[in-house]
Amino acid sequence: MKKLWFFSLLLCCLTCAHIYAADGLKVGDIAADFSLKNVDGSMISLKDYSSSKGIILIFTCNHCPFSKAYEDRIIQINKMYAEKGCPVIAINPNDEVSVPEDSYDNMKIRAKEKGFVFPYIQDATQQIAKTYGATRTPHVYVLKNNSGVFSIAYIGAIDDNHSDAENVKEKYLVNAIESLMQNKPASPDFTKAIGCSIKWKK
Amino acid sequence: MLYKVHYTLLLPLLAWIFIHSAQNINAQNQGRVISFSQIDSLLHNTDDTLYVINFWATWCKPCVEELPIFEEINAKYTNQSVKVLLISLDFIQDKEKILLPFIKKKDIQSEIVLLKAENPNEWIDKVDSEWSGALPATLLINNQKKIRKFFEKQFKHEELQDIITQLLKSEL
């Protein structure tokens, strides 16, 4: 009987965990920490950024044309805000079996080609993408540092025009970072964009 | 007599010209660029037709994998009960270089339009509030019958057909 109770409880917990994961994190939630391998072999965690004002966490990858279209803009945004205390962490959540182009070795090559000066880490188990509720690449989470505890300040798109950086009208991400710098809530704090679906393990 | 011969020769010829010109028009129309407002009016259409609207792109691997499923549906329902529309989110500048050759190579018969997608943040929710923006995504809609089902995923074989069969059954 005890065993049955235990299993019911376990099942309940698993179901709850599943629902929670499916929904992902929302603006205002505490950002989940991680320890994931960077292209240089080092491990990257949020706690390494305790002196930052914020972090621009971008789920992205090598193969997706939308991610590629945004690479230069991501580099530019890091250039603008890393020194001001809000650097970029790029995170690749794709299953490298489904998409060999997104393998760890290919991430190293891509980071070198594009000259990424920010970490490009691999979410090999896809647990972080699931926890955050990321569904596509690119998918941005701006994290705000509240005395060592990071919370989600913005979720969504980089801007409103993936194909033409020159014709961007709404710089959603830049606006959200500027708000963070001024200690104001982002407006909007949630946007959507078209992107490649994250390739989940089968 | 001469009159009759004329007719028997002329009719198949006319039919042949008609069919081929119709096909040409159709082929020329494939991949035409449309704005979201045109899709929005389709989403509010009150025809008694189940629209199967799939958002895809040539570079999206799961999208390309499931295209044959939509082609089967398109071939199966030739009357107005079901209409397949494939909305491509390829880059506009890739239309001639990538999209049109792709349509030709795969010989896609379902109607394909290329969406000039300005600020997706403003129209993604109009397709469905559940849509995060990831591709592929599919909307099944018949406003007259108050049917609206949205899927942000890749369909497995038969799965979409089963859903459509169920929806058509429930209409009766």
Image (cartoon, coloured by chain):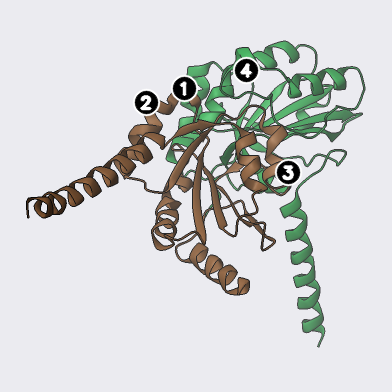
Q: Secondary structure at mark 4?
A: helix
Nearest to the eye among marks 1 and 4: give it. 1
Quadrant of residue A74 within the rendered picture? top right
Q: Please name the residue that numbered disc 4 is placed on.
A: A73
As shown in the figure, which amino acid type bears the numbered disc 1?
Gln
Vertical relation: A81 (above or below) A131: above
Q: Which chain wears brown?
A: B
Q: CA distance from mark 4 to mark 3?
A: 23 Å
Q: Are marks 2 and 3 on the same chain?
A: no
Q: Position of residue B52 (x, y in %)?
A: 54, 54
- Which residue bears the numbered disc 3? A132
Q: Position of residue A111 (x, y in %)?
A: 53, 23
Q: Position of residue B40 (x, y in %)?
A: 65, 41
- Give the label, 2 or 3, closer to the camera: 2
SS class of the residue under badge 2? helix
Callout 1: residue from which chain?
A: B
**Crowd around label 3: few <14 · some 14–19 · many ≥20 (10 Å):** many
Q: Quadrant of the C terminus of chain B?
A: bottom right
Residue A126 visible to the viewer: yes
Residue placed furthest toward the left: B1
